[in-house]
Image: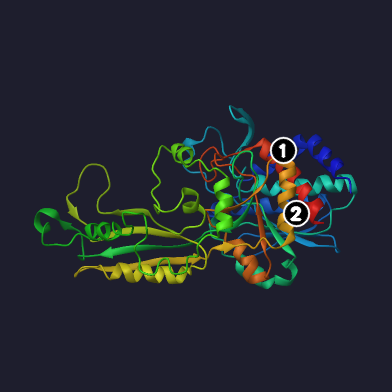
Amino acid sequence: MSLPSVLDTIDHSLPEATDRLLELLRIPSISTDPAFKADCDRAADWLVEDLKTIGFDAAKRMTPGHPMVVAHAGTTGPHILFYGHYDVQPVDPLNLWDRDPFDPQVQDTAKGRVIRGRGSADDKGQLMTFIEACRAWKTVHGTLPGRITIFLEGEEESGSPSLIPFMQENAEELRSDIALICDTGMFDSKTPAIVTMLRGLSKCELTVHAANKDLHSGMFGGPAMNPIRVLTKILGTLHDDQGRVTIPGFYDDVEELPDAVRQQWQNLAFDHAAFLGDVDLSVPAGEQDRTPLEQIWSRPTAEINGIWGGYTGAGFKTVLPAEAHAKISFRLVSKMDPDKINNAFEAWFKAQLPADCSVEFKDVNGSPASVMSIDDPAFEKARKALSEEWGTEAAYVGAGGSIPIAGYFKDILGMDAMLIGFGRDDDQMHSPNEKYDVESFHKGIRSWARILDKLM
């Protein structure tokens, strides 16, 4: 197999590959907003037709929500499955964008050339790196490198309600030797990474009820309990002075980081001062006996994501509200059970409620953490391929976010997942002016070609 010829083809065809990505980025496939349902269908159709041009047997598969795209090629050799998602986040607030988010453009910046537009990094640019690597391989060899299944979702940014049923109903078709997920990032701008640890997530919204209606603070202030006072007092004790979560049993299922992994992470020389400095902060606020990198990748968290109640409009209204509200989330690690954590939080909160108050919980749900074993030789083969392409030793890393699909592959299909992505910390994913570095796009395509060469 002529890998150098494939890499040369990737280099020479980068303008055409970029044009194809720009065409996909022009489709406003916002999955969470029903107004864009037709556009999500159109994005799925676009991908089906593109995959067909390079030899895949591709089809749009309908679900109760947005369609999946499933494509197959090859019948012999190792079987790999590639996962990505074609839906994107909403673009609000639109006034903070420098240009139309669905009129993408290649721009020159102080840090190099970037592809600007919604979905450029999350996840259309990333999924197209794999497709373009397959295209270059087909151009050189006349065939694809082996047995490949491509599985593209259209609801990742809106909770993936159709994903589990679809995977269960099509388990035999989707099951392969290993899954590749391209929805993560580099360790830094020059160091490629394979994510082997993902934090899980559990969350809820709660409402504290007191009086049966809003009250005049001049008439009831003093004797009447204020639910905002109750809510803030309880949530104010969610962490102790050392940054630890105070919910009983919260850490029961948290495993310690192996010494070898801790040492590897320390060798990455993570600059927490620069990390916090980029967002105008300076002091790590998590568990004080853990490094900032451990706090992000291997330790659980409890966060207050929103809190409101009473009058918040213009001017002033001296009211004692009848209700106060908060949204709470927990990032989970190791063997932490989302249901167990949510139940422990509810019990902890209710135990501190004063008389005349009650609490209501809703939207309680979650998914566990994922830990991938690197015993499979495919991991080391991929790490070597990444190191060769980037000229820097690729790292096995954790990720602070949650990608439930990795756990679903294990639980539903019985297969491990390898998470390799080429995003960067400043890509502004989910924010205005999202971008994807042209270098990340280019070297991402080359990286997948090298990985396919070693895995197949």
* Residues marked 1 and 2 touching at CB (< 8 Å): no
Query: Mark 1: which amino acid?
Result: Thr
Residue 30 appears in view:
no
Residue at position x 76%, y 51% in the image? 451
Q: Position of residue 369 (x, y in %)?
A: 54, 63
Dot 1 lies on which element? helix
Please provide percent x and percent y for residue 315: 22, 42
Q: Counting other residues with Cα less than 10 Å from the Cα at mark 1, is it few (<14), some (14-19), or many (20 or more)?
A: many
Give the answer, above or below, for where 347 lies relative to 41.
Answer: below
Q: Which residue is mark 2?
A: 381
Query: Is 401 left or right of 423, judged from the image as shown?
Result: left
- The residue indicated by pointer 1 is 18
- Colour scheme of the picture: rainbow
In which quadrant of the rendered image does the C terminus lie? Answer: bottom right
- The quadrant in which residue 388 appears is top right
Q: Is 94 displayed left or right of 170 in the figure? A: left
Left or right: 425 as drawn, with respect to 279: right
Provide residue 295's location: percent of width, then percent of height. Answer: 46, 53
- Residue at 71% x, 46% y: name it: 386
Left or right of residue 218: residue 149: right
Mark number displayed over residue 34: none
Residue 260: quadrant of the picture = bottom right
17 and 390: which one is in front? 390
Residue 47 or residue 41, whichever sits in front: 47
> Which residue shows up at 14% across the image and 55% down it?
216
